[in-house]
Amino acid sequence: MTFDLMPWQLADFPAYQALITMPPIAAAIGIDTKSVASQQQAFENDIYQTYQVAILIDGTPQGSIVAYQRANELGDPLTTEADLAYFLAPDFWGHGIMTDVVTAFITQLPPHFTLWADVLADNIGSLRVLEKVGFTNQGTYIDLFGRQIIQFHLYR
């Protein structure tokens, strides 16, 4: 299955909203499916990141991948570090698409770039994606919602 990566635009909010309110995606990313304001805020946070794209399959947005720029303890941006986040419509899970998407996305990042990714411990598919593209397991922690999270790291 082939895909294209294209930056999200403000006009794409309805497609983004349809994706993030799908129950499996909403549960994983912690979005309030009843609050359009929180959905709009999540979308605007994503589209204003330097590195963000929609995952298009047959020309239709079916997912998203974003590198959220990290900041130091003073709030100053770290230009070579980011937190990686992504999601894909459940109809496309288990087809190897995200491994290819993550690989393509990280090759577009500048050299000497550090990525971090936090994954729910029971999200086996996402754990495998990160391992396949070269991320290393940095350990486990419990998030604010009591969920077990595994943190991954990649320096390229």
Image: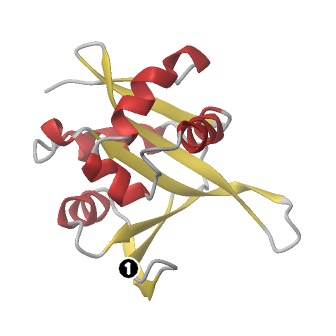
Name above or below for residue 96 compared with residue 11.
Answer: below
- Residue 43, given in percent of the width and then of the height, sits at 56, 36
Question: Which residue: 89% across, 70% down?
Answer: 74
- Residue 94, given in percent of the width and then of the height, sits at 11, 48
Residue 6 can be seen in this image: no
Question: Which residue: 29% across, 76% down?
Answer: 121
For label 1, the crowd category at 10 Å Cα-Cα, with few meaning under 14, some 14 to 19 and many 20 or more, is: few
- The residue singled out by tag 1 in the image is 147
- Residue 21, given in percent of the width and then of the height, sits at 36, 41
Question: Which residue: 37% across, 79% down?
Answer: 147
Q: Is residue 137 left or right of residue 128?
A: right
Residue 65 can be seen in this image: yes
Question: For the residue marked with disc 1, what is the amino acid?
Answer: Arg
Name above or below for residue 35 compared with residue 27.
Answer: above
Classify residue 2 by image quadrant.
Answer: top left
Question: Which residue: 44% across, 41% down?
Answer: 65
Q: Is residue 91 left or right of residue 82?
A: left
Classify residue 124 by image quadrant.
Answer: bottom left
